[in-house]
Image (tube, rainbow, N blue to C red):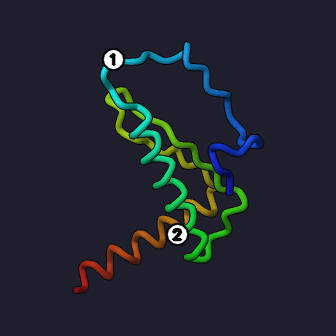
Amino acid sequence: MHDPEDADFEGEPFDPDDVMWVRGVDYVAGWRDAADVGAELAAALESAGFDTAGLKWRAGTNVDGAGMVRLVLSAAAAHDVAALVRAVARLGKAS
């Protein structure tokens, strides 16, 4: 599992000159929310028994400052997550 603040996180380094900043938009709050939720999601997947060794996530924001989490996982892990979501959906429909 890779934390976005980890120096070994694979990806391009952030360059603030490569993005457009809108005055008055609180990007920090959105990023902070995304960082918290990304860590929460990674922990939930790990507690559900998923192998998170290849899991990578990165916090960011969209143009209006809302938090965004980019998640990268193997095809096998994505298949397992899809199966889990389908199982939870079936449980929701059964109740």
Q: Depth-wise, is mark 1 or mark 2 nearer the camera?
A: 1
Q: What residue is disc 1 on?
A: 23
Q: Residue type at mark 2: give it.
A: Ala
- What is the crowding at mark 2: few (fewer than 14 residues within 10 Å), some, or many (at least 20)? few
Residue 83 horizontal/vertical position (percent): 48, 71
Q: What residue is disc 2 on?
A: 44
Q: CA distance from mark 1 to mark 2?
A: 35 Å
**Which of the pair 57/17 is nearer the observer?**
17
Image-quadrant location for residue 12: top right
Q: Residue at x 57, y 75 (%)?
A: 47
Residue 59 horizontal/vertical position (percent): 52, 42
Q: Residue at x 49, y 18 (%)?
A: 19
**Which of the pair 46/77 is nearer the observer?**
46
- What is the crowding at mark 1: few (fewer than 14 residues within 10 Å), some, or many (at least 20)? few
Q: Residue type at mark 1: give it.
A: Arg
Q: Residue at x 67, y 28 (%)?
A: 13
Quadrant holding the N terminus? bottom right
